[in-house]
Image: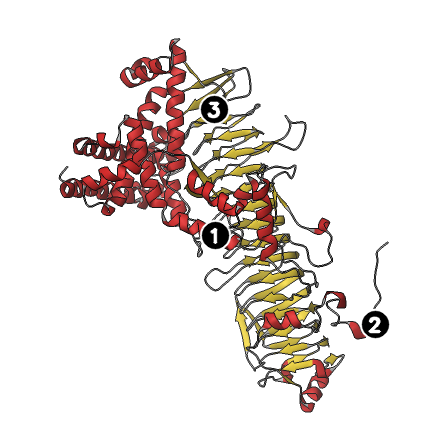
Amino acid sequence: MNHIAKMPLSQLGYQFVEGRYLPKGRDEYYLRDQQRGKASVYRKLKAGEIETLVRNDNTSDDWNNIFVDNDFDPNLVQHCQFYGIVRIGKLEPYFLEFHNLRLPVGLYYSTIASCDFGDNVVVHNVNFLSHYIVGNEVIITNVNEMAVTDHSKFGNGIVKEGETENVRIWMELCNENGGRSVLPFDGMLPGDAWLWTRNRADDSLQKQFRAFTEKQFDKRRGYYGEVGDRSVIKNCKIIKDVKIGTDAYLKGANKIKNVTINSEAGAPSQIGEGCELVNGIIGYGCRVFYGVKAVRFVMASHSQLKYGARLINSYLGNNATISCCEVLNSLIFPAHEQHHNNSFLCAALIMGQSNMAAGATIGSNHNSRGADGEIIAGRGFWPGLCVSLKHNSMFASFTLIAKGNYMSELHIPFPFSLVVNDEHDNTLKIMPGYWFLHNMYALARNAWKYIDRDRRTDKTQHIEFDYLAPDSINEVFTALELFETAVGKAMGKDHKAGRTLLMDEPLKVAGMEIRAEGCENSSRKAQLLKVDKAYPLFRKLITLYAMRNLLCEYARFGGFSDLQAFLKQCRRTPWSNVGGQLMPDDRLNDIKQRIRKNKINSWDALHEAYRETGSVYDEDKLRHALGSLLELHGLKPSGLTAELLRQYLNDSAETLSIITFNIRKSREKDYQNPFRQMTYDSTEEMENVVGKLDENSFILQTAEELKAYKKQIKDLTKKWQL
């Protein structure tokens, strides 16, 4: 049976907070007054104004509880019912216009309980507006219900005074069983979510993260909802327990409940038609349109949900877009694209720069006895058309998975790989270095486009988009060792023999069948392809990575002797991807230790640690890059001579030249393929539709970057007299 309380009408708009939750000497409005501030001074209504209001078919339970600005015009309030204390700012004879919607300033045909209004607002046909503080020049029209409860948490994972623990909202990230759950909170960065979902055996760390969240928000009851200046809310049904920033635009939403919508003039957020959003945080500059369903979620700034997307128990990183499809129990780092109605992502950690094709099913549980599987994918994860993957699986950076049903769990430790399920041969085939060999344009453009599309106004976390970075280079070293071991086994010999053959006789390797062990949880064969090409390529990439970072940072050295002294600090160390921000594990461990010892005692303090780490990222990366170079060539710091450095610089220029050539060549295929050409009557028509190859801005940019790189080498060689 529904419990419907029957209360005296005189209480409507009053007793928002029960007396037992009010501090001694405080009334139910004390938090409201703190939120509103003292910028505006209101007065009581004059007798003539009350007369005008009554004549305009307005009612109030007590006209003495209506307070107004000196520039209040009672003629602009018509057909409204007021309950409780209501404060109204300036109402002047203007109309407000937004996207061809024109409405007169004032309050019309609305029921209003205990609200504060800024100057020159439009409130038109709002069936029930309760306990909101509304900013200046706000438009609210055609809304069924817009109300706030005294225990509203606005999407944050806290409980208010008197509430039981079972009402707390958790986000069950990365795993359907809830074992990696975190508390959502306004301001949560991808790194926060990653740190919290990891380290599950570290009780002190987990307790601190929860304590940070509890401390971040006030448990007192009685906070009002807020609508920031210049926000527009029209044609919405239910808005309950929602906090809205400035310059937001909400149109046609079905239901928004227990949500914070961050928005500001430089990064406005928008919610569109048919959306239903419950228990979530929406970051600055977000877009949510056309039938989206989101429950227990966080959208980081400048992310988008569109066209019926479903986001449940998930964190969506900055500058990411999900449309049409379903995403459950996932933690997604910045720069993710998922656009197709029949793609599905579940119980996954996706580390950014990712793209999911139509029909991809990432995280099916049909090989498991429980909802406890996970998938972890490094940066640049790209499952192709109709790919089906199983828990548990792990993928190195920039893994492309070809169409197919992968029946067993996968562990792909080779970066830049193409993974193929060859059903004809019943073989799992892995081609490391695929992107450099066959589709350099797509790989290089991936890095470029996400830098270009980074719309964040708050760059607390330094996000890395380059495909050659500490995480991928460490994976390259792992792959080199695995290549050597695999070739050695194919020869019936050891690791050293495999290395010697790869270094000295790659043509022999080309004719061998190289097995990949431990890559699939099955008895069938797993084969490595083109190891003879991938091995020297990966070595060249390490040298390019080192020299490119040196050229970016060489101004910090007075000369070659300074570099030699710096090399003593350089070594290749483990790194982690902390929500898109790469950092050495020693710095990460230091941050975690400071959290345990309460030296970092809040989310704000942790965010400052991200900034500090980001400020020295280039130097840390340089140490890693030069350490990688020394390790690759088996050199001690004193062993890097001027002659060797000059050689490595020239080698890197040659490698970058090949990459630049392959960027154009891989794109050129689309212009030369007769099947690509056949839908056009002529070359001219094709170029008018897809653009001319010679005018491709990205290809032209890479050519210019190669010229600049070679000039940098020339300048450095001359300056250091190499």
Asked whether disc 3 touches disc 1, contact meaning CB atoms under 8 Å apart, the reply is no
Residue 61 screen position, x and y as percent: 76, 79
> Which quarter of the rendered picture does the C terminus lie within?
top left
Q: Say which of 113 and 693 sits in front.
A: 113
For residue 368, the mark is none
The amino acid sitting under disc 1 is His
Is 132 on the left-hand or right-hand side of 247?
right
The residue that appears at 71% across and 50% down in the rendered structure is 165
Among the two numbered marks 3 and 1 on one chain, the one whose residue lies closer to the N terminus: 3
Disc 1 secondary structure class: helix
Are there few (<14), some (14-19), or many (20+) residues within 10 Å of tag 3? many
> Which quarter of the rendered picture does the N terminus lie within?
bottom right
Mark 3–mark 1 Cα distance, whole angstroms, equals 41 Å
Asked whether disc 2 touches disc 1, contact meaning CB atoms under 8 Å apart, the reply is no
Residue 673 screen position, x and y as percent: 36, 31
Residue labelled with disc 3: 420
Q: Say which of 369 and 382 sits in front.
A: 369
Residue labelled with disc 1: 607
Residue labelled with disc 2: 8
Among the two numbered marks 3 and 2 on one chain, the one whose residue lies closer to the N terminus: 2
The amino acid sitting under disc 3 is Val
Residue 188 screen position, x and y as percent: 54, 51
**Discs 3/2, front:** 2
Mark 2–mark 1 Cα distance, whole angstroms, equals 49 Å
Q: Is residue 310 visible?
A: no
Is 666 on the left-hand or right-hand side of 45?
left
Given the current orientation, which residue lies at the most extreme front position?
597
Quarter of the rendering containing residue 14? bottom right
Q: Is residue 61 visible?
A: yes
